[in-house]
Image: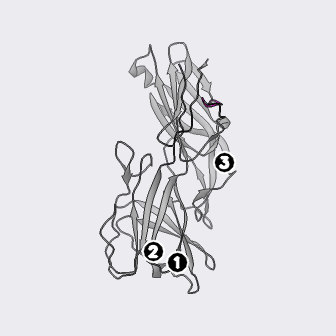
Amino acid sequence: MSNKIFYGSIMAVAVGLVMTMSVSCGKTPVDGGDDADETGVIDIRTSIDALAKAPVLDEEGKGNFSDGDVFTVTVSGSGFTGLGRNYTVGATELMWKDLDLPEDVEDVYFSGCYPVQETAVDGIFTFTVSPTEETELLLAGAVNVKKDSDTAVNLTFRHALHRLVVIYVSDDLTDEQLTQVSTSVKALSSCTVDRAKGIILDGTASGLSEVGIRQGSRVSCFIIPQEKDNITLDVSVGTMTRTLGIPDYAQDGDPVAMLEGGKSLTVQINVSSDEIKLDGVQIGGWEHQGSVDGDIEL
């Protein structure tokens, strides 16, 4: 059977921060909301597209933040110390005057991070994926506006991590037996994030360890962007255990070297009573880049 690998384009999370210079005290509208009253309130509007690990998602992975959800807006620029403000949807009101910026500041940069990372020091924090929970990391790169401007600020939140999905199929095992398949994913588990820039710093992936321990016929986990050779899958069915890696080449001959942030790799594995083999690999949901051919049999 041919293996297929499809790379996809990064699905963005668009967040609009609309700066208004008016005077009312209503809560920030969610999912568009009404036009801002004239108050000086920073009106933060959010939307979340497919595959974001958002609090509220539909079957296609689309959704929005809901009241009570919290993300961090980081404000930075020349001439003042960067600051982070946690924004609670449906409750928080941010105003230009709340930022208390120096009078001579002209350019201000806004960036975003979801979920909130309380351990950030000077806007830098270490992010470590959990082996038992799927914790997404969404980052929005810095956007420049003029201080006190009423110009809309559009923060585009992107998937900072790579999502790995493993699907098990079989010709002779029952669906119930497939639910007992155990998967352990090993990879580099930590990285350094610059919250003010809204990026994972290059070359900071570290800490080879288990990043996903799952059981079932379809499992998934988030991994730090990294070279594919760091990643292995330990698959156990009954007393049988096999270790699988990620294929080296795409069907068009291009090498597959990195598993990048904002992309999703799906691995299909065929299991039976006497063997485990890689049956198909695809990266879907984002921009198409190529496919892989060739079975790996053990």
**Is the residue under label 3 in contact with that under label 2 (CB below 8 Å)?**
no
Q: Which mark is residue 91?
A: none
The kind of residue tagged 3 is Ala
Q: Quadrant of residue 32?
A: bottom left
**Residue depicted at 31% across the width and 71% down the height:** 35
Secondary structure of the residue carrying numbered label 2 = loop
Foreground pick, 72 / 105: 105
**Residue depicted at 51% across the width and 82% down the height:** 100
Question: Rounded to the nearest whole Å, what is the CA distance between mark 1 and mark 2?
Answer: 8 Å
Question: Rounded to the nearest whole Å, what is the CA distance between mark 2 and mark 3?
Answer: 37 Å
Q: Which mark is residue 146?
A: 1
Question: Rounded to the nearest whole Å, what is the CA distance between mark 3 and mark 1?
Answer: 35 Å
Query: x, y percentage for residue 109?
Result: 55, 71
* Lower position in the chain sequence, tag 1 or tag 2: 1
**Is the residue under label 2 in contact with that under label 1 (CB below 8 Å)?**
yes
Query: x, y percentage for residue 19?
Result: 43, 74
Q: Which mark is residue 205?
A: 3
Q: Residues within 10 Å of mark 2 (few under 14, many from 20)?
A: some
Q: Residue furthest front?
A: 252
* Lower position in the chain sequence, tag 2 or tag 3: 2
Q: Range of the magenta residues? A: 246-251
The kind of residue tagged 2 is Thr
Query: x, y percentage for residue 18?
Result: 41, 71
Q: Number of callouts in the render?
A: 3
1 left or right, relative to 207: left
Query: x, y percentage for residue 272?
Result: 50, 15
Q: Is residue 191 above or below residue 211?
A: below
Q: Which mark is residue 151?
A: 2
The kind of residue tagged 1 is Lys
